[in-house]
Amino acid sequence: MTARRVLVIGGSGAFGSRLVERLLATTDFVVVIAGRDKARIERAARELSGLHPGFAVEPVVLDTATLTADDLKGLRLWAVVDAAGPWQGATPRVAEAAIDAGCHYVDLADARDFVRTIPPLDARARRAGVVVLTGASSTPGLSNAVLDRMTRNWGKVETVFAAIASGNRAPRGKAVIRAILSWAGRPVRVFENSVWQERPGWDWPQAIRIEGLGRRWVSLAETPDLDLLAHRYRPTRAAVFKAGLELPVLHFGLWALAQWARLPFVGSLTGLAEPLRRMALWLDRLGSDRGGMLVEAVGTEAAGRRVRAVWQLVAEAGSGPTIPTLPAVAALKVI
């Protein structure tokens, strides 16, 4: 079988580079990585190729802000994977270009507003004979896969809860920080107490316990799961997603900023991304690089017996950034 050419946008980043490594572990793919910085993308291509001798990674300079279908056609691609982010406030320009170029499209988007822009492209993708898949990441890809398995024989779902607790030494790129700051303190629509209501982002702190990690603090996060958990599983009481930082000083420091952001005269916090990233680097020696994920559902089985199901994942040292890439890799293998 001819190897399929896959373009990974953001292939030099924390998540993109790990996705590339997973793709290189099979002979099914030829990987092309794209970015705006020529020197950085070429350096990343050399480093990634060195990890898998005999499998060259091709670098290409592309800017998603001006990307066209013709740009993709010139690369003779089978699929495009967008692992760059942040997706908050973004348009589906890359997905549209991929469809028009006749390429499959997969992204790791965790932005609620962006994920909503992809379903309207379904008919267009079907006419082009390609697959367009969004949210192939920890949220909502992995969380929903887990819940599909846990609740498959249930008659009714009452509550759904999911949370991600990252380790303090996990990579914290500026794009990730900007994404969180874009909704921290802003109104987040969530299904709770059997009604849709608004709560401030990164509010509602809660201590959870993940076996092997102990207690971690999490707060309300703006993710596609807040829509999908409610619409796919139809819980009668609540569908909530939270996220947390390992060090309480960072978690509650962000909580304090979120309270400040609620004031009417305060604008977006995204301009603080770089200063906050630098401040967090001072604390890198504290905590660990072990993170985890928790998914919990309560409901009744088909026979009427009340049941509670819990799934936990612990990302051991260094493996945390790999987890969000696994749904995308799995999707590419079955398309």
Image: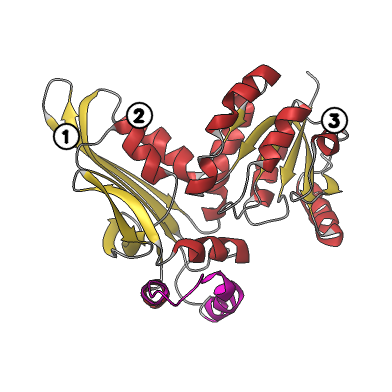
Element type where label 2 sits in the image: helix
Q: CA distance from mark 3 to mark 2?
A: 37 Å
Residue at the spot x=17%, y=21% of the render? Answer: 302
**Is residue 283 or residue 318 the one in the foreground?**
283
Q: CA distance from mark 1 to mark 2?
A: 14 Å
Name the residue carrying label 3. Answer: 76
> What's the residue type where badge 2 is placed?
Arg
Residue at the spot x=78%, y=51% of the render? Answer: 63
First-in-chain label (3 vs 2): 3
Across and down, in percent, residue 246 comes to 41, 67
Q: Which mark is residue 307?
A: 1
Q: Name the image quarter holding residue 74.
A: top right
Q: CA distance from mark 1 to mark 3?
A: 50 Å
Name the residue carrying label 2. Answer: 149
* Residue 104 lies in the magenta-colored region: no
Quarter of the C terminus within the rendering: top right
> What's the residue type where badge 3 is placed?
Arg
Residue 269, above or below 147: below
Residue 56, above or below 244: above
Element type where label 1 sits in the image: strand
Residue at the spot x=38%, y=41% of the render? Answer: 227
| Residue 200 in the figure: left or right of residue 176 | left
Element type where label 3 sits in the image: loop
Quarter of the N terminus within the rendering: top right
| Residues at circles 3 and 2 in contact by the CB criterion of under 8 Å | no
Across and down, in percent, residue 276 comes to 54, 77
